[in-house]
Image: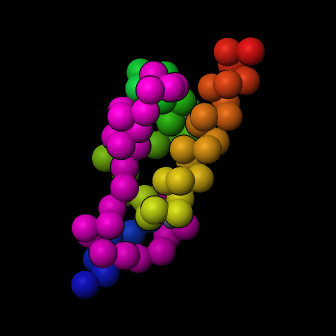
């Protein structure tokens, strides 16, 4: 049953396929504390649901921003 909704693209999908920014705590870089701050500026919290496509996009965006911050 497709009863979950992606906050970004608004597509409906299965609850078991929900992704949140919490999965980014397993990345080595950027650090999760930085990641949380970054997503707060985008008004995204740790409990917001996203589909795989959108979370992958956010992974890339946050990575790129972090690299630009550091350099
Ligand atoms: Zn989405």
* Residue at 56 percent of width and 47 percent of height: 58
Residue 3's quadrant in the figure?
bottom left
Which residue extends farthest top?
71
Residue 24's quadrant in the figure?
top left
Image quadrant holding the C terminus, namely top right
Residue 47 in percent (x, y) is at 31, 47
The colour style of the image is rainbow
Q: How many marks?
A: 0
Placement of 50 over or under 38, stated as above or below: below
Query: Does 20 appear in magenta?
Result: yes
Placement of 33 over or under 11, stated as above or below: above
Which residue extends farthest bottom?
1
* Residue at 59 percent of width and 36 percent of height: 62
The one nearer the camera, 5 or 61, is 61
Residue 17 in percent (x, y) is at 32, 66
Query: Does 54 appear in magenta?
Result: no
* Residue at 26 percent of width and 69 percent of height: 15
Placement of 41 over or under 7, stated as above or below: above
**Left or right for 66, reference 31:** right
The one nearer the camera, 66 or 10, is 66
* Residue at 43 percent of width and 33 percent of height: 27
Judge whether residue 3 can be spotted in this image: yes
Which range of residues does the magenta coloring cover?
Answer: 7-31
Residue 1 in percent (x, y) is at 25, 84
Judge whether residue 46 can be spotted in this image: no
């Amino acid at each position: 049953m497709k009863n979950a909704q992606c906050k970004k693209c608004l597509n409906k999908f299965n609850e078991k396929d929900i992704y949140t920014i919490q999965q980014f705590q397993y990345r080595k870089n950027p650090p999760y504390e930085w990641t949380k701050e970054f997503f707060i500026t985008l008004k995204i919290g740790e409990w917001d649901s996203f589909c795989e496509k959108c979370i992958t996009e956010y992974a890339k965006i946050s990575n790129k921003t972090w690299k630009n911050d550091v350099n």
